[in-house]
Image (spheres, rainbow, N blue to C red):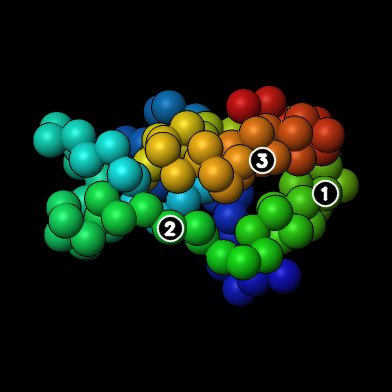
Amino acid sequence: MASYNLIYEPKGRAREYAALACNLYRGCDHGCTYCYAPSATHRSRAEFSVASNRAHCFRADLETEARKHRGAGTSGQVLLCFTCDPYQHLDTSEQVARSAIKILHRNGLDV
């Protein structure tokens, strides 16, 4: 499994929106002018708007983490996503959002 947590507990003011969260992509190809995420992720707006997959084994790692949460009795909602749009243009080809939702539901976590 990856050394980072895909499903994480948001910190600070973000915690009021969800107890758990998962960012499906790095960056977002919508390029919204009002978006806070480029500065929150310490990337330029131009760099941030070139979205990419998080890792080649994202689905397998997410499945592993979701199973651990199920085993620990974790329930509730996972917010998708604080730093990107889960259904951005890249998702048309990658289909990560639908896969992630299925994985989370299969393991007792709502979205």
- Label 2 sits on a secondary structure element that is strand
Residue that lies at the very extreme toward the right in this rendered image: 71
Specify few, some or many for label 2: CA neighbours under 10 Å numbering under 14, 14-19, or 20 or more. Answer: some
Q: Position of residue 81 (x, y in %)?
A: 46, 38
Along the horizontal axis of the image, is 13 left or right of 18?
left
The one of 93 and 66 positioned closer to us in this rendering: 93
Q: In this rendering, would 48 be left or right of 11?
A: left
**Residue occupying image coordinates x 76% and y 40%:** 103
Instruction: Give the labeled residue for mark 2.
Output: 52
Task: Provide the residue designation for mark 3.
Answer: 100
Q: Quadrant of residue 57?
A: bottom right
Q: Tell whether label 1 touches label 2 (CB within 8 Å).
A: no
Name the amino acid type tagged 2.
Answer: Ser
Instruction: Give the quadrant of residue 99.
Output: top right
Disc 3/disc 2 C-alpha distance (Å): 16 Å
Q: Residues within 10 Å of mark 1 (few under 14, many from 20)?
A: some
The outermost residue toward the front is: 93
State whether residue 95 is above or below residue 79.
below
Residue at the image point whose x is 47% and y is 32% from the top: 87
Mark toward the viewer: 3 or 1 = 3
Q: Is residue 55 above or below residue 96?
A: below
Location of the C terminus by quadrant is: top right
Q: In this figure, which residue is indicated by the disc labeled 1?
A: 67
Q: 42 or 73, which lies in front? A: 42
In the rendered image, residue 52, in percent from the top left (x then y), is placed at 43, 58
Quadrant in the picture for the N terminus: bottom right
